Amino acid sequence: MRTPFRFVTRSCKAVHRLQQSSFLSPISAVSSHQRIAVLRNTSTYFCKEDRSYYITTPIFYVNASPHLGHLYSAVIADCLHRYKLLQGFNSKFATGTDEHGLKIQQAAEAAGKDPLTFCTDVSERFKHLFNSCNISYTDYIRTTEQAHCQAVKHFWSVLCNKGLIYKGSYEGWYSTQDESFLTASQVGDAWDSSGKEIKVSLESGHKVEWMKEENYMFRLSAFRSQLLDWLRGNPRAIQPERFYQAVIQWLQEDLPDLSVSRQRSRLQWGIPVPGDAEQTIYVWLDALVNYLTVAGYPDKCSQWWNVAHHIVGKDILKFHAIYWPAFLLGAGLPLPQTIYVHSHWTVGGKKMSKSLGNVVDPLVRSQMFTTDGMRYFLLRQGVPDSDCDYTDNKVIKLLNAELADSLGGLLNRCTAPALNPAQVYPSFCPQSFPSQHGGRAVVEDYNMLDAVKNLPAVVEQHYESMHVYKALEAISACVRQTNGFVQRHAPWKLDRRDSKDQHWLDTIIHVSLECLRIYGTLLQPIVPEISNKLLSRLGVQPGERSWVDVNFLPRYQGMDCPFEGRALGSDSGVLFSRLETYMGLDTFISQSTELGLPT
Ligand code: MSP
């Protein structure tokens, strides 16, 4: 992927400062409008019908209500979907619920409900959470839907017809909680709450049981070398790198054939094996096919399937990076382009779980800290490579520092009537801030321009590798630099009656608003409401907010700035209100319950 600025050809090498800086006029002879037209026509970049992109979240188990970890998977996918839309892609974004299997069958029984009613209730809760948190999915799939069941049956028949499924018998460990078959080396000893010795999965810690069943097996062992070839030929297929290495390692270990059905007598809640009413299709095979169902399978699905990217938590990597590609290879279908893996949110150092009672309710938190606040926190603090511990205090501190004080403070300063009485995007004065020294700008100001000019490329690179926290780190550092710029030059001390002071004041505000425009544009995938408020306040129209519009400070490069002289948008209040630490969580939760808010 390229940014507009990478079309730059360096043209002013004679200027000493600019020789060191990357802030050069890209195509300085053309106007900004012409430049956008150039970019739009560039095949590597924009708005072409064939530039499709397909991003998925895992589909969520409906055995319990959604928690913060689930929202995290969805927010990452939403961010990448919105980012691709900004880049002019035709993006499809699928999420939904995983409704079959023993775990759900048992949960429905425990709730005393028929399975479908139970699934519908919990699926609606996920949907409600996602709608409340601006998760802009284009498709919401439930595995109990007819179209999906058809797709799974078709997929099964294809594997069967290719001789990849055979009737056998499975004897070994099974974890209902993970819906996973385990080898002896993946199981260890533990004690349950009553002190009884039990066997658990070494990876998840969930209880496992010995089972012996007649069922259908998939020839997984036949795919080891094809999977290794795929990965070695596509070193970016699984990101971050440490998870890619883990999969390579697994593939060098034991890879037995995989049981892909359960006896109907044990598992009724699932799709029957075509032609054998005594067997139910293994829930992971059923669930993984959801990605194809959304793409249109078994009808023509290549538009989406050829450009599929999965977001998954590290606990379900094996299913996505080994089983799924093997099924796809078996069915003669292309493999996903990227599997982006994220780590977990813990509370008190432990993975959230209902039994530990440490589950963080994302709906309550997004009401407390706002939807955008929660989105920002999760993406700013969530590091794909390692687990992160959640506390409310961390959220409050981060949001107050970066959204309320730093970003909100900057917008407030530059748009406040005291500094900007005309309420316009003021003019940039090249004499005050010349491309060579001699004006009023100092070296830190030039450094800031460089940093902001490079920011879209930096952010793009981090979004592409799902290191969203690094993108936010870079944006946050630039916001601090811009605040430093305003503070350093204290425009409130300038004398408006002096025309030179007035020009410099206008220039300071112009530059700061340009910085804010870039930050607002780049932040849209993360905090859509805040970005909208910010850009609207600057008077930036909806059609001026895409990735082609991140041409920073064109006036400095001798080009026209479409915003110069334009009236600001109306003031709709502070960008992000400071959160008070005294607002106790317990009080909030009890208030929400009283108000009948779902918790
Ligand atoms: N149903 C399967 C996925 C099938 S996809 C074909 C499943 N569901 S899940 O509800 O258990 O998990 C869904 C996603 O939530 C996974 O990516 C999982 O990693 C993520 N999370 C669950 N708990 C989490 C945390 N505590 N922290 C971050 N994400 C976690 O697995």
Image (tube, rainbow, N blue to C red):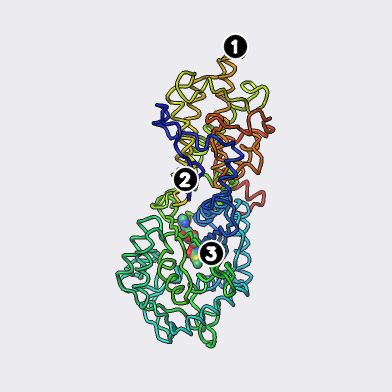
Q: CA distance from mark 3 to mark 2?
A: 26 Å
Q: Amino acid at mark 2?
A: Thr
Q: Which residue is mark 1?
A: 498
Viewer-side label of 1, 3: 1
Residue sitting nearer the eye, 177 or 270: 270
Is label 1 in a helix, a strand or a loop? loop
**Foreground residue among 138 and 356:** 138
Q: Residues within 10 Å of mark 3 (few under 14, many from 20)?
A: many
Residue 352 in sight from this viewpoint: no
Q: Which residue is mark 2?
A: 391
User: Regarding mark 2 in the picture, which secondary structure is present there?
Assistant: loop
Label 1 is placed on what type of residue?
Asp
> Is the CB–ligand 1 distance for label 3 below 8 Å?
yes
First reached walking from the N terminus: tag 1 or tag 2: 2
Residue 596 coordinates in the image, percent (x, y): 66, 52
Position of 333 with respect to 575 (left or right) is: left
Give the residue type that dot 3 points to: Ile
Per the image, the residue denoted by label 3 is: 59
| Mark 1 and mark 3 residues within 8 Å of each other at the beta carbon | no
